[in-house]
Image (cartoon, rainbow, N blue to C red):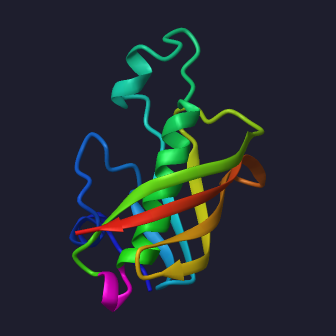
Amino acid sequence: MMLNREQIMEILPHRDPFLLIDEVIELEPGKRVVALKRVDAGEYYFRGHFPDEKVMPGVLIVEALAQTGAVGLLSMPEHRGKIAYFGGIKEAKFRSKVVPGDTLRLEVDLEKIRSRGGMGTGVARVGDKQACRLTLTFMLGT
């Protein structure tokens, strides 16, 4: 299943400038999600995050992975209309920088889903290079 930005906003409460995924290219609710983020030089954070060498902040790569995982969790019928909050981040490793012009491929495999939250592993890639890998924990709210 594929989702455009408007369809993503029907699932997530995030809005510009903090919606960090542009489209979902694979979706198996409750199992796996793959999304894309096209990194543009006009992004608000580049004005202050190394203006002479623009680099997407790692914390925003983590947030983009969390939003991707939240789409997988909140697209499940029993979780529609809820909000997914961060419960934790484990073993985040950053391997390469993300710069304007890159397309960030965000892959999240949801491994444990419960009525009040879940856990998954995420990988962010640019081309064949891994930019970030981590484990995310989510809590569900209404």
Q: Residue at x 32, y 90 (%)?
A: 77
State the quadrant of the C terminus. bottom left
Q: Is residue 80 left or right of residue 99?
A: left
Q: x, y (%) of residue 103?
A: 56, 49
Q: Quadrant of residue 10?
A: bottom left
Q: Quadrant of residue 123?
A: bottom right
Q: Which residues are magenta?
A: 75-79
Q: Is residue 66 left or right of residue 53?
A: left
**Could you tell me what secondary structure mostly forms the magenta stretch?**
helix
In the figure, 100 relative to 109: above or below? above
Q: Residue at x 33, y 27 (%)?
A: 44
Q: Residue at x 55, y 51 (%)?
A: 88
State the quadrant of the N terminus. bottom left
**In this orientation, which residue lies closer to the viewer: 29 or 129?**
29
Q: Specify whether residue 76 is painted magenta.
A: yes
Q: x, y (%) of residue 86?
A: 45, 53
Q: x, y (%) of residue 57?
A: 54, 30
Q: Specify whether residue 136 is painted magenta.
A: no
Q: Residue at x 27, y 40 (%)?
A: 17
